[in-house]
């Protein structure tokens, strides 16, 4: 692990932050080598039972730890002692699929092996992400099931990219709006950079196309009214429910944004943190033994 860099609290952490989390940079173990990562620790500094591993957006071809920094500071400060580990992954222009998903799964395994360094008790791990990062979070849940490790307590998918075919109604309707048409074109370009044509139907590339969705961890899926990714998020939620996976799907109200694809900003402006807090509280309640 590299030398840690303490980062100052960010001003304007938002209405959900109860305290400024401790933040430091570190390195996580990827599939082929170290990856830049950032740890957010809320609460009193005692070991936390919950670790959220988060992957940033950027359409597989862009993005870094700063993209979701404001949102993750709010998340770490909003609940009772959460620990959030944000990790980078191999971008498509360096290596295409499956490099990113193998990195994401490797980070989960690394986190489990280094729980003491993360201030985590090892009890519950939740995987999360936004946009392309939400794709990786969904895929990690599949991989962890298929490879029997690590144990994942829940998955949080925020406005996820799940359909390389761009075939949903919300995606096809968006070209009627100039700004939203730009988002569709960006999604198409992102998938062209990330996937070879033969990989587009692979369940680790397109979870929405998977026919094996049983025995996955409970899911919280958040879509947005004005997002082209809305329908694929909700379609995946239905498929998970049909497969017997406890799933909560919420469609969020539009947020007033400067850019139509500013999903991190959207997550900060709408009630994402409330939904995540409720979801995590539900996981904790399920984990408690029943009283006689």
Image (cartoon, rainbow, N blue to C red):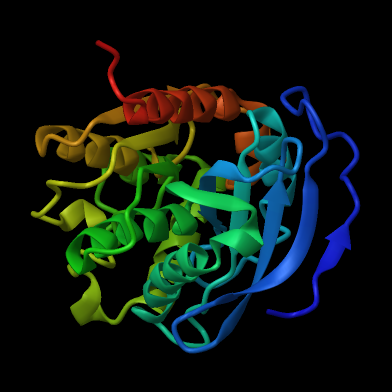
- Identify which residue, 173 or 17, lies in the foreground: 17
Residue projecting furthest to the top: 292
Q: Is residue 96 left or right of residue 111?
A: left
The total number of labels drawn is 0
Residue 288 drawn above or below residue 81: above
Looking at the image, residue 190 lies above or below residue 161 = below
Q: Looking at the image, which residue is at 81% across and 31% down?
A: 19
Horizontal arrangement in the rendering, residue 39 relative to residue 224 (left or right): right
Using the image as rendered, state which of residue 253 and residue 84 is in the foreground. 84
If the image is split into quadrants, where does the C terminus sit? top left
**Where 238 sits versus 274, above or below?**
below
Rendering quarter of residue 257: top right
The residue lying at 64 percent from left, 53 percent from top is: 119
Q: Quadrant of residue 75?
A: top right
* Location of residue 196 in the rendering, given as x and y in whole percent from the top left corner: 29, 82
Quadrant where the image shows the N terminus: bottom right
Q: Position of residue 274 (x, y in %)?
A: 56, 22
Q: Is residue 292 visible?
A: yes
x and y percentages locating residue 211 in the rendered image = 8, 54
- State the image quarter where residue 11 is shown: top right
Q: Position of residue 234 (x, y in %)?
A: 29, 35
Q: Which residue appears at 55% of the width and 29% of the height?
A: 272
235 above or below 7? above
Asked if residue 262 shows in the view, the reply is no
Q: Is residue 1 left or right of residue 11?
A: left
């Amino acid at each position: 692990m590299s030398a840690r860099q303490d980062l100052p609290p960010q001003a304007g952490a938002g209405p959900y932050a109860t305290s400024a989390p401790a933040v430091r940079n570190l390195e996580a173990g990827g599939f082929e080598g170290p990856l830049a990562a950032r740890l957010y620790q809320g609460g009193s500094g005692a070991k936390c039972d919950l670790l959220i591993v988060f992957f940033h957006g950027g359409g597989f071809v862009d993005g870094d730890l700063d993209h979701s920094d404001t949102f993750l500071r709010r998340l770490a400060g909003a609940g009772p002692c959460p620990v959030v580990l944000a990790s980078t992954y191999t971008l498509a222009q360096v290596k295409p699929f499956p490099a990113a998903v193998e990195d994401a799964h490797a980070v989960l395994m690394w986190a489990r092996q280094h729980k003491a360094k993360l201030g985590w008790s090892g009890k519950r791990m939740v995987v999360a992400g936004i946009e392309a990062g939400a794709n990786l979070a969904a895929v990690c849940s599949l991989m962890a099931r298929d490879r029997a490790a690590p144990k994942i307590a829940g998955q949080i998918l925020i406005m996820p990219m799940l359909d390389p075919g761009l075939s949903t109604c919300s995606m096809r309707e968006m070209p009627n709006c100039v700004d939203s048409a730009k988002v569709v074109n960006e999604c198409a370009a992102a998938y062209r950079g990330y996937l070879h044509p033969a990989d587009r139907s692979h369940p680790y590339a397109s979870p929405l196309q998977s026919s094996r969705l049983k025995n996955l961890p409970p899911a919280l899926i958040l879509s947005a009214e004005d997002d082209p990714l809305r329908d694929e998020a909700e379609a995946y939620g239905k498929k998970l429910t049909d497969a017997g996976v406890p799933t909560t799907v919420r469609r969020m109200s539009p947020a007033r944004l400067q850019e139509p694809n500013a999903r991190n900003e959207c997550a900060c402006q709408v009630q994402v943190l409330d939904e995540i807090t409720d979801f995590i509280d539900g996981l904790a309640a399920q984990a408690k033994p029943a009283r006689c």
